[in-house]
Image (cartoon, rainbow, N blue to C red):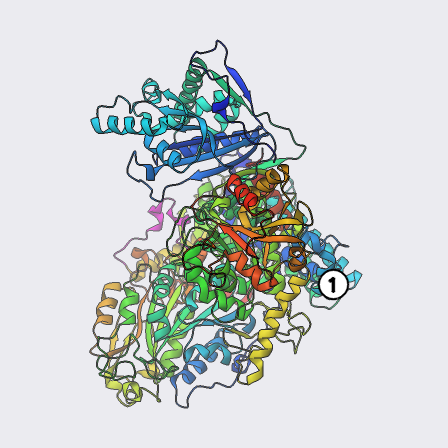
Amino acid sequence: MSTRLPVVGDDPVFSAEQPSSPRVLERAQYTVEVVSDSGEGAQSCGQILGTVSAKMGNGVWTVEIIPAEVQPPPRNPAGASGNRVRIGSGPVTNWGDRTDLIVAFNEQALLARHRLDALEPGAVILIESMWQDHDDEGIRAEWSAAMEELGAAGYRIIHVPAHEQCLALTENPYLGKNMFMLGILTELFDRDTALIGAQIRHRFRKKDESVAERSIDLLELGIAWARENLDFRVSVPPVPGDRDMVVMNGNQAVALGAVAAGMELAAMYPITPATSVSHQLGEMFERFGGIVHQAEDEIAAAGVAIGASYAGKTAFTITSGPGLALKTEFLGLAVMTETPLVLVDVQRGGPSTGLPTKVEQSDLLAAIFGQPGDAPHVVLAPATIEECFHVMVTARRIAETFRALVIVLSDANLATGVQPFPRPELDQAWIASAPDQSPVPEGKAPYAWDEQTGLSQRFIPGQPGGMFTVTGLAHDERSKVAYTSDINQWSSAMRSRKIAVLGQTLRPPSLNGDDAGDLLIVGWGSTKGAIEEAVARARDEGLSVSSLHLTFLSPLEPGLAEIFSRFQKVMTVEINYSDEPDGPFVTHQNRRRGQLSWLLRAQTLVDVDCWTRVLGEPLRPGAILEVIRSNCGAGGER
Amino acid sequence: MSAVCSLFQLHDESREYGMGDYEGAQARWCPGCGDHSVLSATQRLLARENLPPEKTVFVSGIGCSSRFPHYINTYGFHGVHGRALPVATGVKLHRPDLHVFVVMGDGDCISIGAGHWIHAIRYNVDMVALLLDNEIYGLTKMQTSPTTPQGYVTNTQPRGSYLPPMNPIEATLGVTNASFVAQTAEWVPAHMLATMEAAYRHPGFSFVRILQRCPHFTDDLFGELPKHPERVQLLVHEHGIDLEALEGRFPNRLAHDPADLDEARRLAEDASVIRLGVFFRDDSRPRYEETRHLPAYTAPEKLELLERELDRYAV
Amino acid sequence: MPSDDREGTTARVLTALTGSREAFDSALARTAEEVRAFLEAHSDPGTDGSGSVAARLGAFAGARIDAARFTDLVERGEPADRQTIHAAQEAWTGLVALRKRGTELYVARVPAGGDLTETVSAALTESGRGFALARAARFVRDGKGPTDQSGGHPLLPREWSTAERALAPPLVVEVDGADLRVGGLADLLEGGQKLVLIVRGPAPPAPLARLIRPWLLVAQTADPEGVDALGGFAGPAILALMPEEAAVFSHDPRRGSGYARRLLVEHVPEAVPVRAGVPRPTAAAEDLEHLRELWRLATLAVEGAAAETPPTAVTAGGSALRGVAAPGKPSEAAQLGSAPPESVAADLDPAEPHPADRLAGWLLEQAGLGAGGGG
């Protein structure tokens, strides 16, 4: 991704006078935000724009801007709710840096984005103007103050009388303004109105037909207003690909992936941002004979999944950080009993309740090492929404083959991001078959560990001759409680060995960029797109930087020490907290580091540095680029 | 019609099982422990109902009684403290064709597992839940349990248990969708077996509290009871339990229709006498695993369905 | 029954049979998937359609797991011989194909002048192919090698095991009244077998009366909604959707012991209508008389036991066919019994054989239809 996005404000087409026909800005990529108070529908507006753009063949990345409360106080910067939609001619792999155009339903939501440095200098602002002359003196004062604050930044501010316009069609414009705004965007980006209409109808399919019809009327009103009043259009021409594409968010992909894996039981307890996986499954799973069990708590959800897995096909449970903490004891049980289990952790900010709706990658070490006692297991991290789909197939298969716990680390960025990706070419071999119920040959033990691999064949209830009791106590290969000293050493070795065997089947990771150089950036999970975009820009600038992205975190992908040795400096880029190396009281030894860097240092004995941020938002490629610039050739902490 | 997993299991139906078929490892409970008699009654029940050992699963938590699955030759799941019920729920949800029994102690079920217990009652999944209540923590050597009588001296409450004990029958009867609630005592084996049989045959979550002697730590709680049948009142009814054989030994009998929930609650609340029998049963309460039961599909059918699903996301 | 909407009626009946259809269908699917599990575990990966190791691991593993090394280290299965794999594959294909036939599997039509019993038997043999396939596959799976049973040769209903009968595939049969000879069906009505006859054209008024047995749900109705009575009943059942003028009755074992409890008659025609086309008028008259006799006995008994309360059934108007499902394990249901209609049964002692039952038993014995023979 070598394009530095042209800045709209720089463009000479913008002048005070309205040209007779609007000027069209040709762009390779363009970023739009829609923000409102919670409940005013900016999210629907942004999502429809994103989905339709994807359907038209554009690359798209959509990110939700979510307040923590369902109904935060109105007209409050903390309550800004909406979407960022980054549209590209080719694939878009991350949310980008700053937005080129923002549609704001009030000036406070707009101010929130401005203060978060989310707006490109000179960005176009389409702002609902009703507040300017509001009856409430306080509101008028807030408006003026906001305009003064924004004025300094050199944005191009366009007033949109959305409320007033919508009154022609509805008594309550708060419930329809988003469709008017969508109309404006439809006209600005020349979106296919038939596709937009279909999306609107789909969204309101469970409501009275009149709701969709009124929405479409409002949409057309917005289109008409834009035609008459806006002097520019943006063209991001799609580059048609030759593959069938699907478009969805990461949680939808996890849900569909679970179905593709043939799993038939998901147990969960509502938790943000994991819950929408169960919304998706709840609507769909039963059509495949599957059950989404909403348990009484996080612990029970893990227990139900383990019970189901023990008696049949591998089941899975979905959670986020606090839930992961609660499930810990059961995870240990899954490891000890070698019961296959898949756990999806959609990470959010922590610790504790933390930032429930915001992205973080701070569960990595808890996922790998968080179970008291030695509990070797598998940890995978999808890096894209497409991988959120496919990881479920692999996770299920590994869980079953290795009788293992497999933790899948997604995050809020993947969960709520929407991106088109090649339609999966489904394969029957992905789908779990029914549990084996054939008789167990006499003399076979339930943990007949193969000394070389630590693997054993599990017995499933219903298999004649296989009766045994699994136990969370240390046990021998017949599952008898260990009463002698050597059994625990041996069985621990077997449980660890099988994970080592999986590690032995892994290929060394491939590099993005040259095989050697000044700087190697190592990432994991949802940051891949941003890191690779930043690396591409840096390489365009002539910097000697490469990147590497890990998806198998336990067991760790092989060959890392050797790869690292070819670079002057290695550093991770992550969304978790690390001390600045020069922070007060921070020494090289006591510095709190990014979680992956901690892991890599321990596993490779290489002095891996890190750059991390916990701003409650995905990393911006521009910010990573700055890090690369300042670390290339610098040698870092070495 | 019991749920069917596959046509493969429609054979070998003629096999008859005896007590010996259910014998597991040698039980390692203390001599005289009530667990022994519960184990033997359970094996008797399985033989009587001719349950194939491979189709039967005993799930337990942690505690003396939770060693139970090791000593019975069926499938067993000896899990973590307090959480047998979620595991059992998972087994039954995924495999309604299996016969599921849960064995819990008083600390296991009533204390650390209380949340799961309340919800399991409401789910009403078809399984037998046995609460082996010796009113003390035995395995960890005599700590107060939620059912330890007030004033009873233990290692954690040396001045005597501070609070009145929890009444598990009363609590269970208070939960929405409770469908079978009974109490029995391991020193009345005929009653215990009849209770377990009624529990097994009840379609739904059958909660049976078994009063149980712990000769090692609480011999004084139940130890004398076998000699004092007058302290026991049998609840008798044709829809509950009515054993002629017990008439002579337990003259104190009360006719109680298990359909009468209000009366059941009143009887449960009154602690002046130890009541054995079925307090309540309602075979028609909705069962979660039945409500959630769905038809099965083959892999090619699933692929077809999934293609259709993906169409909805197609660009 | 509206004769102009035959398809609609059949669809309606299939819906009423959803429970038993799904049970059989699901068992087919699960069996197929168990055979697939066997193939996955015992075939040489990649050579026989069970999917290569790389395919099984999925696209996420694609560039990251070395499939050859994975096969070498991990997927060291116990490959079975080619003949065994072939037999298992045949079973799998057969089961999947059977599933593909959907509801067609549960519908049969007796050609005009055809033999009802033969049609039913042939249709059940066809759907029962699932049992044969499963037997063959199980034989293979258990390491006993392929047999000549593999490939799912037809298995006649009389060859089904008790457990298979319990899961018997239900059947909807469209039949002309003229071909309504039900005697031969008695042998097929075992286990969980459900048969629904959709009768067209002139028909005898009480053809199913002769099938009444204590454990068998037998019902005649003109109302397609009446088929819902079959829902939730675990035992064998036969129901006929008859033309308007036929007798309407139901004999439902769930109502308790004794004909007085089980039998509800809503309508009995005065006589066999003398009309062109009603076949075998003598047999038809005998059936009708048999129904009258049973009903008279039941009514008598009720009057004897509770003289002050009139029998409810005659006024029940349609309720007779909406029995209350008795959930629970069969043994339990039998022990508790489903509550009989209040007014009929209030004073009856459930433990004692009902006087009407004793009488009816004696009568049936005399008529050569006694319980001693068929039970």
On the picture, is B232 further left or further right than A501?
A: left
Residue A335 position in % (x across, y down): 53, 67
Residue A289 position (above or below residue B195):
above
Residue under numbered circle 1: C72
Q: Residue furthest right?
A: C82
Q: Quadrant of residue B273?
A: bottom left
Residue B108 position in % (x across, y down): 37, 73
Q: Residues within 10 Å of mark 1 (few under 14, many from 20)?
A: few
User: What range of the chain is rendered magenta?
Assistant: C307-325
Residue placed most toward the observer, B12 or A185? A185
Q: Amino acid at mark 1?
A: Asp
Q: Chain of mark 1?
A: C
Residue A540 position (above or below residue A473):
above
In the rendered image, is residue A280 in sight? yes
Residue B81 position in % (x across, y down): 41, 72
Residue placed most toward the observer, C240 or B36? B36
Residue at x 38% of width, y 83% of height: B189
B195 drawn magenta? no
In the rendered image, is residue C195 in sight? no
- Secondary structure mostly seen in magenta is loop
